[in-house]
Image (cartoon, rainbow, N blue to C red):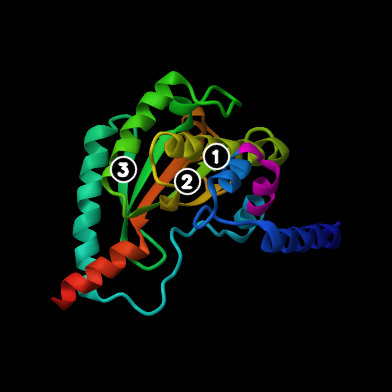
Amino acid sequence: MKSIKLVAIVLGVCVCLSSCKTWDGMSKTGQGAIIGTGGGAALGTIIGAIAGNTGIGAAIGGAVGAATGAVIGNRMDKVKKQAEAQLPNATVETVKDTNGLDAVKVTFNSGILFATNKAELSQTSKDELNSLVNIMKQNSDVSVDVQGYTDSTGNDAINNPLSVNRAQSVANYLTQNGVAYKQMKNVNGYGSSNPVASNDTPEGRQKNRRVEIYMYASQEMIDAANNAKAQ
């Protein structure tokens, strides 16, 4: 049984390496196809969850100096303050991206965005996301990742595609309402992996059912910060 699972994972990795793409550099038609179908994306994100690959942002070449980090930190602090002011029903935090730079994490309890076991956005959730759209449009040099999660009830056959589809619904709404496609870098679902609270209580399960949105420094912002410190 273990060998069968291993083969399945290896085959899945091969499929993803040969066919999966990120949003960056894709045509709108290609991105729409990914958003419209959860199967292929689910495979890639399930494997990502197994590997624990939930890092934010792509690693850039070379180390980022303290001066550049400070410039980006100041900028992301402004983004965080915007999010705190405009998203009262979300949790807003400062986290670190793959490069050790400040990033902003916005967490929506999935109950705010979705009905139970559904991936369609309600009108209330659209109202919430409209504020996020405005923030991202005002900060067009910020890159964005969207991650979906569930609690541990049910099974992976339900939870994994549900988390993918919910993340995709959020990403799709953002781009349909004016967020630039180039800003959207990764849209993933991780099922019940990486819980933030105990699944043994209703309160804990509610916290685990969530969509996390990360705003972090794009290469454009990093280059601008490097130029600023050089002047």
Q: Quadrant of residue 22?
A: bottom right
Give the residues drawn in magenta, as a range. Answer: 36-44
Looking at the rendered image, the quarter that the N terminus falls into is bottom right
* Image location (x, y in percent) of residue 14: 74, 64
Q: CB under 8 Å between callouts 2 and 3?
A: no
Which amino acid is tagged 1?
Gln
Q: CA distance from mark 1 to mark 2?
A: 8 Å
Which tag, 1 or 2, sits closer to the chain's start?
2
- In front of the other: label 2 or label 3? 3
Q: Secondary structure at mark 2?
A: strand
Q: Residue at x 31, y 32 (%)?
A: 131
Q: Are marks 1 and 2 in contact (CB under 8 Å)?
A: yes
Which residue is label 3 attached to? 137
Q: On the image, numbered disc 2 is attached to which residue?
A: 146
Q: Position of residue 2 (x, y in %)?
A: 82, 60
Tag 1 secondary structure: helix
